[in-house]
Image (tube, coloured by chain):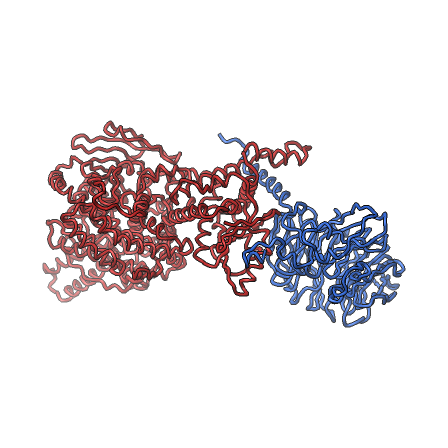
Chain colours: A blue, B red
Amino acid sequence: MLRWLIGGGREPQGLAEKSSVQTIGEEQIQNPYTELLVLKGHQDIVRFLVQIDDYRFASAGDDGIIFLWNAQTGEKLCELHGHTHKITAIAPFSSSDDTEEKTDLIITASADRTVIVWDCTSGRQVRKVSCFHSTVKCLTVLQRLNVWLSGGSDLCVWNRKLDLLCKTSHLTDAGISALVELPKNCVAAAVGKELIIFRLSASNNGSEGWNVLEVKRLVDHQDNISSLVSVNDLTFVTGSHVGELIVWDALDWTKQASECNFWDSSVHPDVQPEIKLSQSPNETSVQHLTSDEECVFAAVGKGIYVYNLQMKRVIACQRTAHDSSVLHIEKLPNRQLISCSEDGSVRIWELREKQQLPAEPVPTGFFNMWGFGRASKQANQAAKKMQENTPMYFLELVGDLIGHSSAVQMFLYFGELGLATCSADHLIILWKDGERESSLRSLALFKKLAQNGDLQLRL
Amino acid sequence: MISAPDVVAFTREEELEDDLYREPPLPEEYSVPLFPFAGQGANPWAKVAGSKFTRDFILISEFSEQVGPQPLLTIPDDAKVSGTFDLNYFSLRIMSVDYQASFVGHPPGSAYPKLNFVEDSKVVLGDSKEGAFAYVHHLTLYDLEARGFVRPFCMAYISADEHKIMQQFQELSAEFSKASECLKTGNRKAFANELEKKLKDLDYTRTVLHNETEQQKKANDKGYYTTQAIEKANELASVEKSIIEHQDLLRQIRSYPYRKLKESEFHPYEPECALDRADMGSDQDPTASDPAELGETHLYTHMPSYTPKLIKAKSAKCFDKKLKTLKELCDVYFFTQTLDQLHHIERTFRGDVCYLLTEQISRALLKQQSVTNFLFEDVSFLDEKPPEKQYRGCQGLGQDTTDEKCSEESLAPKVVISLGSYKSSVECVPIKMEQEVEDSEEPKMSESVMSEHQENLDYLDADIKGSISSGESIEVLGTEKSGSGLTKSESQASLPVIPSPQAGRSKVGSRRTVSEDSIEVLSTCPSESLIPEDFKASYPSAINEEPYVDDDEGGLRFTPRLNPGVDEGQDDVSKQESLVQVDAACCIGKESPSFLEPLPELGQKPCEADGVVRIPPQPYRPAEQGLRGGFPSHEGLSGGLLPYELDSRYLTGSREVSKSSLDECSDSTSYISSAASTCSDRTPSPAHLACAAGERHRKRAGQNALRFIRQYPFAHPAIYSLLSGRTLVVLGEDEAMVKKLVTALSIFVPNCGVYAKPVKHWVTSPLHLVDFQKWKLIGLQRTVSPAGVNVLHALSRYSRYLSILDADSKTLRCPLYKGTVVARLADHRTQIKRGSTYYMHVQSILTQLCSKAFLFAFCHHLHLPISEREPEESVVNRRINFLKLQLGLANEDIKIVQYLAELLKLHYIQEPGQGGNPLLRFDYVPSFLYKI
């Protein structure tokens, strides 16, 4: 289209022809999002979205401001000012103590080396902690223990009254990049290439006292661990910058399986070598991991890979799902997968089972990489070569959302309320199902009519 | 849009002329002799051909205690308007109607003179011989030096169309009441000031006299009073009595019931402010006798120092003084306001009554459609309020150093008001300008006037001679009388009764026939207080015009005129008036010379006032006068062409350019048509009570749209995009061309709210998603620079939200349209030729769409299940069936109605005052590329 605009001639495939990225075109029957609301407020890159309850979410980013939004109406509920630098981590902390009424708190950490706890209802600052030696890079709430952890150059454990319960010694200057809760009061912290398991235990001398002990260090990764996610009570997964994916046993912290050649020709033997060479480490980095009970979904470079835990292999992949790095992916309940990327787009994928005769030759990745024209059906069959009799899966692009003019940092799926995306263009966009919104408006209209008494016949 | 355009259009002349001018004129020998009375542009259908004036005008007259009834000024201030019509004679007529005179003086049983605050009287007069019918509004102003402290004035709206006066009586009455209220308010202020000065004089005189008496007492030890002393004492006593009288008057004038001001929507100034001042004034009354304290009081500190004069005894009844002019009577600011209001009245009611009525009816109906009217109507003109009090503010007043009010106001705490008003005073300048522009058309119409003049001259003279004393041809057609019903007199039975547009309006009135001297009262109206509120509300605003921008085209230079200029013009008028007054003062009993030869004087006046502007038409005046000697009237037509051309240039140069974004790019034909619209004489402009600008814009937009649908075969999908809420981007290198297209297409854009149309005429930066929320029609610059590539990149990125009309390569990229509605809306084979007609056609089809959308949005069972258990699918089915079968919509038309319905819903559920988040709705539909 760009070429058409510039030159005047019509180019059927336009830009799509040049890039290997699969495109869907303008007709997207399965894409429910036909209405959008732009939420303006942030002055800088918006990096975090976090859900507070059924209809509220918070956004935070480099401008140090936290906004609370109504996901249904797009109304700005609150503006929380307090941090002087960019926000580095945010976590919701809803308490359900029997003694007090339910309060929704959020904890935010900032590069100004403070952590602030906010009350979402009143918009007030509950407490500010500024005794950190370094920036807190991750926050985790252990609801079960009613404590929360902050990870920077050391690991601190706090109770909900914001008392420091215990802390580890200084670990590294780089600090903890990710934390995940494990069974048996354990947490896994990603520190550089290492994965450190800590165990929290009640101290002997007091009821409120806790101790944190380093239990184990796992050094299986070749490079920095970039993502860490818990799959279920028995398993958690880590991904590293060079594209290693390791599945761990959550109880004894042993390696269950690993996959390290996402981009490798071992998966797609026909891929030409020069393409392999052109891939920088950044393109193989595991940016984000998410999982359901069966599979782990990995955003690796520009691609998305589906790793089945039972089969212990990648069952489907989309090597170039986006024009640029995929920053966040999430699995929806309805077999759909949403990914967002630095290229400013959000894409909706569906994991489909491919009915295929076993004898039929498996299509090669060549088509995928070169995106031959409108042969998208074939291109989608990016599943790897597999044994007979096993079902084949592929990721079908069912829709894309184009609205942001810059990298989409994150998104938040709100079920039928829609989808919130945040981006480096300072905007948050609420994507909504136009049909549903329309009928909601009709409902509101007739409610208002009844209120105004306009439904009565006027004589 | 409700009116039937073609019927009305026929009575409007500008379009006829428009067509006339497109073709080269026939050689003279082939031309058919024209309608005998008609000069160029005269309308054979007009009933008013026999009348001696060419168009409606407003006349202000005074019943001067020195010279009797005399005309003061006309609006428009142009001799050609009144033509051969005898203003002096007519003034005599309208001022001689007996109306409720205000009684001022010593009422029996009261020690002091008493001021009566009388209501104005409103009558309709007809002079069938002159072919003139007038709404006459009598009012009384106070003047300390006048007999009985009153000066009777009247304002008359004079038209050749009796029906217009009768049918628009209520509206005229309401509008003139505003003008009158403004005048009277100013007058009260001026009167109070005058009284204050007088009091100071008296006080000073008293002090002087007192001192003299004391001195005499001291000098005189003889024990008896000299006659001189007694005289002095008497004098002192009379001065003191006079002081008390004047104080009482001051109290009375300040205690004027301001409730009236509060009731009406037209506040010449803030009532509270006035009240404050009045209170303040009355508080100070007791101290008023003490000059020492006076100097310190707030009221006088800001006054330019006034040195009291000694008042000679018995100077009060002196007749050989000049009376104050109207402007002096009501202080410059209020006088100007009144003039503005009168000009506004003139513009509002000019034109054919049929058009006025249609306009009013459609406006009234549109107002009732409160749910849907925001979509395609210019809502601003629907619920227009009276224009912001058009304060000339302090700036204008500041020039007048004798005006206390100015300084007082500027220092008072209400400065904010004055500031705000200053702004609006800038806006109200063009009202005058337009008037002048029209005045400048005079050479063109002067032929007709002249020829008419020639031919009518003979019987005219006889007429005047015969009728001066008798008055048999004068009828009082209406007068003010409340509480009785209207009945038609036999003589007027043939009058068609046109239903009044407003339902709630009642024709209250009474008929009184005075048979003896054939003065007939045809109808009366309820007094001012009975005028329904909605009439007051329908006060048109004409303030959205902007001051001129300089235009070098054709070598004509325009100096934008601001307040001072206007004031100068007015000053000139007043100067002339004052000259006249001086003359009159020294020759009491003689006829006032001012209107003996009204034609030349009135004609020249504006030219003197602003010579620069008038230059183009001027040279032609002598030529025409020379022409009219022996040439047949239609010969003048070709002679008049040149100034006409000039004028049209001049017009467009001034007005169109200044209207900035509307349309810079019209070609010469539309120039001519626009010029024609403003310079046709009898039924000139759109009477709509609203801005001529809006009217002109619509016409221009309609013209451009017509051209667009003829030129572009893919007009349908483009219009469909707009109607279905998909943003249309007009891309092009040439700004004028793009803007022209945008203007053309803007008439198809539904409004999203009551705010401005979501149209952006020209953008040069890359578009963003937020822009598509805000604007539904965008003109976008195409450049070859790297920045231009960004612009295009953004376009291609967001292409799913956009339809793109490439003005340079004449291509359109947008979704397919297979419906039928747009085909009716924009048929390229349409027989409609004129922009305004097409605009109305569009409006009527859009209104149909609106009503469908309304039905769709407000049918309960189409959106919600009838019973709890009804599945969603059946509701959807019902909805689709309704759209297809009941509303008869096909294919994409459904989307149009759905989009409009969605807008209606949003508008309805939106809480007032809350902006609401603009949302962007879109579809995932493929686009196609259309080429010519």
Q: Is A386 left or right of B750, judged from the image as shown? A: right
Whether residue A34 is situated above or below residue B404 in the rendered picture: above
Q: Quadrant of residue B839?
A: top left
Residue B335 visible within the image: no
For the point 67% across and 47% down, the residue is A31
Q: Quadrant of residue A152?
A: bottom right
Number of disc labels = 0
Where is the N terminus of chain B found, in terms of image quarters? top left
Q: Nearer the viewer, residue B463 or B720?
A: B720
Q: Quadrant of residue A278?
A: bottom right
Whether residue A44 is situated above or below residue B669 in the rendered picture: below
Furthest residue to the top? B490
Q: Is B811 left or right of B503, judged from the image as shown? A: right
Q: From the top left corner, tell me how far across and down residue B445 is, in percent.
A: 24, 48
For the point 27% across and 40% down, the residue is B122
Q: Nearer the viewer, residue B928 or B771?
A: B928
Q: Is A209 left or right of B481, judged from the image as shown? A: right
Q: From the top left corner, tell me how far across and down residue B642 is, in percent.
A: 25, 54
Q: From the top left corner, tell me how far across and down residue B631 is, in percent.
A: 16, 47
Q: Nearer the viewer, residue B471 or B254?
A: B471
Q: Is A451 left or right of B252, judged from the image as shown? A: right
For the point 49% across and 59% down, the residue is B781
Q: From the top left corner, tell me how far across and down residue B500 is, in percent.
A: 36, 34
Q: Nearer the viewer, residue A163 or B886?
A: B886
